Amino acid sequence: MKKRSIFYALLLVVVVACGAVLFNLNPNDKPYTIKNGMIHFEAPERAPGQTSMLGFAAEPIQTLRVGFIGLGMRGPSAVKRFSLIDGVEIKALCDLYPENVEKCQKILADRGVAAADEYSGEEGWKQLCEREDIDLVYIVTPWEWHVPMAVYAMEQGKHAAVEVPAAMTVEDCWLLVDTSERTRKHCMMLENCVYDHFELTTLNMAQQGLLGEVIHGEGGYIHGLERFWHQYQGNWRLIYNQKYRGDVYATHGLGPICFAMDIHRGDKMEYLVSMDTDSWIGKELAEKSLGTTEFANGDHTSTLIRTHKGKTIELQHNVYTPRPYNRLYQLTGTKGFVNKYPVEGILLSQESVQNSGVADHEDLSAHKFLPKEIFEEVVEKYRHPIQKELMEYAKKVGGHGGMDFIMDYRLVYCLRNGLPLDQDVYDAAEWSCIGELSRASIENNSMPVAFPDFTRGEWDKIKGYRFAQ
């Protein structure tokens, strides 16, 4: 009897071990290691012959030929915007559903633009990428398709522009970086918030030294999606949040701060710590829409980041609770402070006011925002050159107040003129990897997580962020 018990015990061990291999059930099978109290994700070495994309500029493309993949929620507005930009030919339209392609054909017809070739079905996007008469593939699909489509486009000799987040795992972030470096094709994440008007103005202020040294930034994505969940085809966004903890949508809040702090252009993010609340509203959504009470994503997630130069960034994610829309967006400098939500405000030290070039005003306090008339004077004086060129027309076109048009215009402008893009593949990787890094921290009792250096040691090669002109 004793021998039989030992036999069955050993058999159970073998079965459990085999099951862990076959079905990946090993709870310790994580894509990271823990060393000296900090989580580290694997950083692959750069392959032989593969070179950095920092400052990369492709050959100028006189007429930019574009193909669009994903024509559901945001795709049609992108097609419309591109139809308004000179030097562009819209060659192909692709969506899983043919009726979405037809809607975009009507947009082109209303603009007097020639009809584009049509693709649909499960494999239509590959056929679009394989065309020889396309320079840029513009990807507006659910998150899980961003990396496969962007990688395939680059491997077919196309530049790739991909919606946010560009990737959902650190491994996929590296795949985008390595593919871009190997193929010498751009991979730009379509982060529109860096082109919003207050962000551009205050970025220019920071670059002109008006804020002194920018030492802290706050950003977030606080946007109750109660009215929008059903608009995501197949409920894909809610399903993702049901499966994963962490700040899964960090790029809107993080991007403008990284530009102002010169991330991978003189500084780099070193590590983060994250924590979240339990899920209350998320579980209600899951029970109502998915038939389960299991929901991983906390109703509110908070993340703190420290940079190599000793600066800090705070991020928040909350798409559940009833709150006013808020991306936070604050910059704290040694000589000034800017804030966007709930009201736009600028606070400057007396020295910065004197150096700003605005009229001499009395009774200015470093403890409150500039009065309205002085605020308007400072904003007008420090509007970014890109704003001065595009702002009024962009507002008429629309798209989140015009920032979407500025984003697309700049992408086309840089490709047509052979300039480095405003956002490179390292921005895409750094801003997107927050999802998995924050999840790893939360799942390990808010343990610090080291940031992968996607530039592989070249983060200080470029001195300061600037838009190419």
Image (cartoon, rainbow, N blue to C red):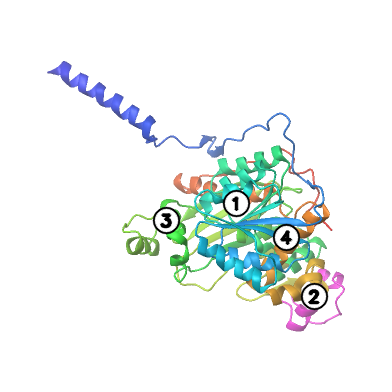
Residue depicted at x 56% and y 58%: 70
Residue depicted at x 86% and y 69%: 355
Amino acid under label 3? Ile
Residue that badge 1 annotates: 166
Q: In this view, does 226 lie above or below 117?
A: below
Residue that badge 3 annotates: 239
Picture coordinates of residue 208 (x, y %)?
83, 63
Q: Nearer the viewer, residue 360 or 405?
A: 405
Q: Is mark 1 on a helix, strand or loop?
A: loop
Residue that badge 2 annotates: 378
Q: Which of 210 and 19 is in front in this view?
A: 19
Report whether residue 110 is seen. Answer: yes
- The residue segment tinted magenta is 349-377
Crowding at dot 2, Cα within 10 Å, few <14 / some 14-19 / many 20+, comes out as many
**Mark 3 vs mark 4: which is more N-terminal?**
4
Distance between the alpha carbons at the discs numbered 4 and 2: 39 Å
Task: Give the number of the mark in front: 3 or 4.
Answer: 4
Amino acid under label 2? Val
Membership of 361 in magenta stretch: yes
280 sits to left or right of 67: left
- Image quarter hosting the C terminus: bottom right
Amino acid under label 4? Glu
Picture coordinates of residue 439 (x, y %)?
49, 48
Distance between the alpha carbons at the discs numbered 1 and 4: 24 Å
**Mark 2 vs mark 3: which is more N-terminal?**
3
Task: Give the number of the mark in front: 2 or 3.
Answer: 3
Crowding at dot 3, Cα within 10 Å, few <14 / some 14-19 / many 20+, comes out as some
Report whether residue 368 is seen. Answer: no
Residue that badge 4 annotates: 89
